[in-house]
Amino acid sequence: MGLGIPMMKSLAEFDPRRLADDLRRTWQARALVETQRTQLGGVVLSMLAHSYDDVMPTLMRVVFPGFQGIRPPFLCSAGKINKRGHVIADVVMRDNQPPRKNRIIYRSLTELRDDFRHLADSLKLDDRDRIDMFNCLQRWIVADQRLDPTMNPADPDARRLTVH
């Protein structure tokens, strides 16, 4: 579950600039740059931190030179799907304040999926990177609290299972 950087044959081949350039070309780094200061950027950052926790400090310093730390607002939990089908997460709004629990990030999985499809298109990701990105997104959603996630909302029986 690495960042897709080719392995070096020996320490003699180690070139920090080349390694940094390789890292900047990964879909992870490009997604961070493309989505910075957007709602989707918050999800991308949280999603990458969830999947690549150990390498995030390095990735952030390479992608954003001079990076010191993440400033609020930011997502501080993995995503969940609540009973109504909203994608929710905990959000830190200000320093020294407790996180706001279960804030709605997306009204539906469809909206989230479509935003990530548009991101993949704008980054011109190949099939392998698209699959990797959506697998990473899938790992970020850690809970689904809907009564029946497979039920079609257009089905007449879906109305009797709605949450009031």
Image (tube, grey):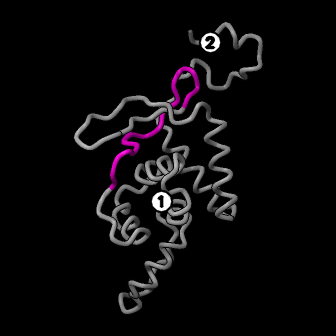
* In magenta segment, residue 106: no
Q: Nearer the viewer, residue 106 or 77?
A: 106
Residue at the image position 60 percent from the left and 50 percent from the top: 134
Image height of 146 relative to 124, above or below: above
Residue at the image position 22 percent from the left and 40 percent from the top: 96
Q: Nearer the viewer, residue 143 or 36?
A: 36
Q: Residues within 10 Å of mark 1 (few under 14, many from 20)?
A: few
Helix, strand or loop under label 1: loop
Of mark 1 and mark 2, the one earlier in the sequence is 1
Position of residue 124 measured from the top left corner of the image (x, y, whole percent): 68, 65
Image height of 164 relative to 22, above or below: above
Which secondary structure is most common in the magenta stretch? loop
Amino acid on which the number 2 mark rests in the picture: Thr
Image height of 92 relative to 35, above or below: above
Disc 2: which residue: 162
Residue at the image position 45 percent from the left and 52 percent from the top: 45
Helix, strand or loop under label 2: loop
Disc 1: which residue: 1
Contact (Cβ within 8 Å) of mark 1 with mark 2: no
Region of the chain picked out in magenta, as a range: 70-86
Position of residue 50 measured from the top left corner of the image (x, y, whole percent): 41, 49
Quadrant in which the C terminus is drawn? top right
Amino acid on which the number 1 mark rests in the picture: Met
Residue at the image position 62 percent from the left and 49 percent from the top: 116
Most distant residue in the left direction: 96
Q: Nearer the viewer, residue 11 or 41?
A: 41
Q: Residues within 10 Å of mark 2 (few under 14, many from 20)?
A: few
Question: Which quarter of the picture shows residue 66?
Answer: bottom left
